[in-house]
Image (cartoon, coloured by chain):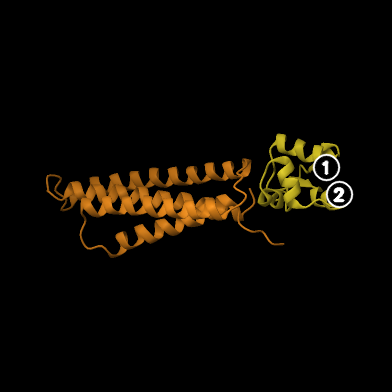
Chain colours: A yellow, B orange
């Protein structure tokens, strides 16, 4: 289990938003959105806030910190 | 899930292909060193890299690079630096060993050319390691 998990895919699909649309709105590549959704990349704080802002939810609803997780 | 390559990944694969295509034959098939060959190789890699990067830039609609690209780039440079630093230490150690105990005569006419070839080889290896490390980083979790 990774250190930082996220619910971006669920939140994004609920809003019928594509990975490319989310990527364009937060200023990253689609491959980075894919990597974040697959827990392969933990974004910077700035990008994390942008994701939460675009999805219209608090940061902690998007990202969760698991102290027992392994990177 | 389909994960097509980003602009940066495409340029990295092109760089690696160009490096292997140009440097590979030089280091594995050449018989004799010469300054002209090294110069020719440098010109060839610049021309090939320019052509490939131009083609990729024209064919890729979305040329955005982001924080992940920059992080991976830094990781690549770290791997390249560690490689060249290690090769330098090993290379200088071998040079000292051969000069002290072996047949290497530092006043020989060909020594300069051998040095050029060896140090250029180190740069090439470090560059290939850098590019390969970046490609691997795109495929692995960061």
Farthest bottom residue in view: B29
The dot on residue B75 is none
Mark 2 Cα within 10 Å, few/some/many (few <14, many 20+)?
Answer: few
Alpha carbons under labels 1 and 2: distance apart: 8 Å
Farthest front residue in view: B58
Report which quarter residue B69 is drawn in: top right
Q: Residue A45: image x %, image y %?
A: 71, 35
Q: Residue A13: image x %, image y %?
A: 84, 53
* Nearer-N-terminus badge (1/2): 2
Between residue B10 and residue B90, name the one nearer to us.
B10
Q: Is residue B134 visible?
A: yes
- Asked whether disc 1 touches disc 2, contact meaning CB atoms under 8 Å apart, the reply is yes
At 82% across and 43% down in the image, what residue appears?
A62
Chain bearing tag 2 is A
For numbered disc 2, what is the local secondary structure?
loop
The dot on residue A55 is 1
Chain bearing tag 1 is A
Left or right: A53 in relation to B124: right
């Amino acid at each position: 289990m990774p250190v930082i998990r996220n619910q971006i895919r669920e939140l994004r699909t609920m809003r019928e938003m594509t990975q490319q649309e989310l990527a364009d709105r937060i200023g990253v590549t689609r491959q980075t959105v894919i990597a974040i959704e697959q827990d392969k990349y933990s974004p910077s704080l700035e990008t994390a806030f942008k994701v939460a802002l675009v999805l219209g939810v608090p940061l902690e609803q998007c990202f969760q910190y698991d102290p027992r997780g392994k990177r | 899930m389909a994960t097509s390559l980003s602009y940066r990944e495409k340029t990295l694969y092109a760089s690696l292909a160009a490096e292997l295509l140009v440097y590979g034959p030089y280091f594995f098939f050449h018989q004799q060193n010469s300054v002209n060959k090294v110069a020719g190789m440098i010109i060839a890699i610049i021309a090939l890299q320019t052509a490939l990067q131009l083609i990729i830039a024209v064919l890729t609609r979305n040329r955005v690079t982001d924080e992940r690209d920059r992080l991976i780039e830094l990781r690549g440079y770290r791997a390249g630096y560690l490689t060249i630093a290690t090769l330098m230490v090993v290379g200088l150690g071998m040079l000292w060993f051969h000069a002290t105990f072996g047949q290497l005569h530092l006043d020989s006419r060909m020594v300069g050319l051998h040095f050029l070839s060896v140090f250029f080889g180190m740069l090439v290896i470090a560059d290939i390691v850098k590019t390969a490390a970046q490609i691997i980083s795109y495929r692995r979790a960061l």
